[in-house]
Amino acid sequence: MKTIDDLKPLITALQEIQQIASAVALLSWDQETHMPLGGGEARAEQLSVLGALVHEKRIGEEMKRLLSKWLELETGKLQEGDAAWDEPARGLLREVWNDYSKSTKLPSDFVRRIGKAASLSHQVWVEARKKNDFPLFAPYLKKMITLKKEEAAYLGYDDSPYDPLLDSYEPGMTVKQIAPLFAALKADLVPILEKIMVSRVKLKEDFLHFHYPIAQQLVFGREILEVMGYNFQNGRQDLSAHPFTISFHPTDVRITTRVEVKDMCSSLFSSIHEGGHALYEQGLSPEYFGSPLGEAVSLGIHESQSRLWENCIGRSRPFWRHFYPILQAHFPDQLKTIDLESYYTAINIVRPSLIRVEADELTYNLHIMVRFEIERALIEGDLDVAELPGLWKEKMREYLSIVPESDSEGVLQDVHWSGGAIGYFPTYTLGNLYAAQIFRQAKMEIPELSPQIEKGDLLPLKEWLNKKIHRWGRQYRSGDLIRRITGEPLNPRYFIEALNEKFGEIYLF
Amino acid sequence: MKTIDDLKPLITALQEIQQIASAVALLSWDQETHMPLGGGEARAEQLSVLGALVHEKRIGEEMKRLLSKWLELETGKLQEGDAAWDEPARGLLREVWNDYSKSTKLPSDFVRRIGKAASLSHQVWVEARKKNDFPLFAPYLKKMITLKKEEAAYLGYDDSPYDPLLDSYEPGMTVKQIAPLFAALKADLVPILEKIMVSRVKLKEDFLHFHYPIAQQLVFGREILEVMGYNFQNGRQDLSAHPFTISFHPTDVRITTRVEVKDMCSSLFSSIHEGGHALYEQGLSPEYFGSPLGEAVSLGIHESQSRLWENCIGRSRPFWRHFYPILQAHFPDQLKTIDLESYYTAINIVRPSLIRVEADELTYNLHIMVRFEIERALIEGDLDVAELPGLWKEKMREYLSIVPESDSEGVLQDVHWSGGAIGYFPTYTLGNLYAAQIFRQAKMEIPELSPQIEKGDLLPLKEWLNKKIHRWGRQYRSGDLIRRITGEPLNPRYFIEALNEKFGEIYLF
């Protein structure tokens, strides 16, 4: 039987291309963290030149020559049949061909056109959001929607033109799966939210907004990251306008954060969140760097790792049993009179709000549904972008019972659409669902997990995730992976159960 | 007459290649400033992949096709004759062809071999220096010398195999020019040094080594950089083990420094020095970015810019008349009892020492001559590397009358030879000579220069340098450029005059 060793030349070629892609990643990291303002224009040019080079090489003659040794370029069928290869090799060839075939379906001219339009549209969005001027942005968004429809047509689909776009972020996922999943989820979430809204429990949270010196926040955040097993020998944390994780290689995975002096949660939970992403990237196989076996499965699974750490761990009682006294020692003036229970409930307050990135664990998903329905309608139908501000308000009222006064706090709040990232939003909620299902499994397989967490020992969980998820790269698709880990397909029940348990106890229902 | 506009396709192609080269530069900058330790191995691999890609493109089919439109690839002769082109276009074609022709003379296999050997030899040198173990390094250095002789043979030469190596750093310069120049310089420098050594003037400098908090040193350094006209909108300053300047584009030119709490001179003068380099890079034409017209002439001219700022300005009395009270205000505890005169003389103390990078303005050049003579003998003759430690001591005694006890403080102190940078050292002294000659011209052409400097107004000088040197890129070679600026070829007299004037006054001879 043939193995991954027979594919060595392919892996080497992919690694060389990835070295260029990693340089692009460094250019982006630098742009967000250190680049002087004046360098922006040259950097955009540079990103475009190197990005095009990567695309060129991914569909170039060398790749064609290598791939056609083992499979039919048109269909991806393995020339010697599936049985001739072992599982990792099969997974590798399947995913390489998939990437290759997607890339070749998009004409170079189209890639250039959409790249240019996205860059322009993004710039206008920044201005429009600042000025609360949706009509300024509308024609650029309209252009992006047209281009994304064109992209869907190039990529091809069976049911919905939304499918191939979603597939770019969550391979294998379709509207047919997501729409009923989200409907069921909504049916379960809304009653929980209603119970919370009518609860007589009133929680205090003013102490989260006392003055928390920035340097001290960073020190504590770093301690937590170290305890999670994030390896600072192979990573670092910087400041940026929006927190993100970026990897150049499993030995160099960087995270960023934003620190607000009047909000002790913002940097802390974003650090834990990005730390979860970073553990995934640091846990990928360096041996298969650059090939699908050294890459994350999907955005949904990636988000499951960040959400698991942020919510299942970082907002849990066992975690703070150990870390709250340490936090108090860092901020005695702010927290010495606040007991563990008050702190724990404060960081778990649920309340409908306007801004997605500030939403709590529960209502966050309702924000996602609003976006999913709108972007699906934009791509599948003839929804006019001019109607978006009104539609946004309508859906916010329906899902969250609150309505933004301005478009900046409404339809203009997210960066995604401006750059053409349509089909991305659902992966956030998928991440929450995967996280709950995976965490439940972890608790069953690591019987001592809760007491370990209460002692501040997070490494057994990290190692379990390494073993169950990270090390596999893209050998299994997300649907197969979750079945391998938990014995069943994605099931939103575990997320709902976890919310009921946590919030029932906090809000007494 | 044809102009630069007719060469637009060539410039565009060069710019695209330079975008990749700038990514390589960012990878290096990051490696020295921010990269986590564990990322080193993957980074080395990445630098090698991208470096090879740049080399490939510089001698690739596209470049061949473009160049052969206008010139004979074998000889560089312009097809329509020199008279058909205006001066900038002629300069551009001359330099592009030169680079191209040098690159093609080196077989790819040789480039790979020397790259690998240099990387290995550098690693061993780091260890050998730490352990004071020259014999450990000797076989690697021997290998590098053999390879550099091979390189010289590929590149070709008339008189000395040292010439093509020197030419890589200082295009057009030869042993025939440098050897007599250095001999004359030595004949003038040694008597000045002797007068200083027997002078009865004893200068105090202990206050330079009081405790100077790092953050405050950086703040003052930044103020000076701003006054020099270094544009922080298009640059930034970071910390690194060894100070350097690196450019990704004239709109993004970064410098680094190293700060020592017990030495207020180290970071300050290295910042002014790197600031001088950076002003050159920020002053290059963005329009011709990536082409020779947007590049610095030579290392010698580059060093003239850093030395002019560091020594002619930064160690001058007019400069400190303005800035010393400001420095005192930054460090009142350390400097309030020290008057301007004591400070000015302390930062100008001349004293033979073992380490080149710590040497004063005068003896620095004697260090360079020691290295020039040794590396020339290594390349031209059969000098055995085993003899180097002894030869080093002998030459140090001859030039500086002091002898290192260990090789770490002797022949192992500099990084250059380990990486194959042979022919580089002379450019440091050329820089000092160019600087003095250029600064003398500046004083003649800007009659108010001294009073301006005494008022802290350094911009007129910066603008004069922009106009006389920076904007031209490589349109003129260094010999032509200095003649254009000062009306005569490089003349060491001005450097000697400046030293005599300064040190005669300080040491009373």
Image (cartoon, coloured by chain):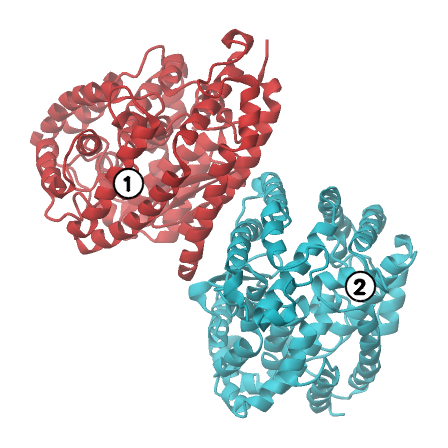
Chain colours: A red, B cyan
Q: Residue pushed farthest top?
A: A83
Q: Which residue is disc 2 drawn over?
A: B163
Q: x, y (%) of residue B283? A: 51, 70
**Label 1, on which residue?**
A416
| Residue A171: quarter of image | top left
Mark 2 lies on a secondary structure that is: helix
Quarter of the N terminus of chain A within the rendering = top right
Dot 1 falls on a residue whose secondary structure is: helix
Mark 2 closeness class: few <14, some 14–19, many ≥20 residues within 10 Å: many
Q: Position of residue B218 (x, y in %)?
A: 50, 66
Q: Nearer the viewer, residue B390 or A447?
A: B390
B193 and B487: which is toward the camera: B487
Check disc 2 and give the amino acid type.
Answer: Asp
**Mark 2, mark 1: which one is toward the viewer?**
2
Which residue sits at x=84%, y=60%? Answer: B161
Subunit that carries the residue with mark 2:
B
Distance from disc 2 to disc 1, alpha carbons, whole Å, reads 57 Å
**The one of A386 and A127 positioned closer to us in this rendering:** A386
Q: Is residue B298 left or right of residue A404?
A: right
Q: Which of the two residues, A434 or B201, is positioned nearer the viewer here?
A: A434
Q: Residue at x 24, y 32 (%)?
A: A361
Q: Give the quadrant of the C terminus of chain A.
A: top left
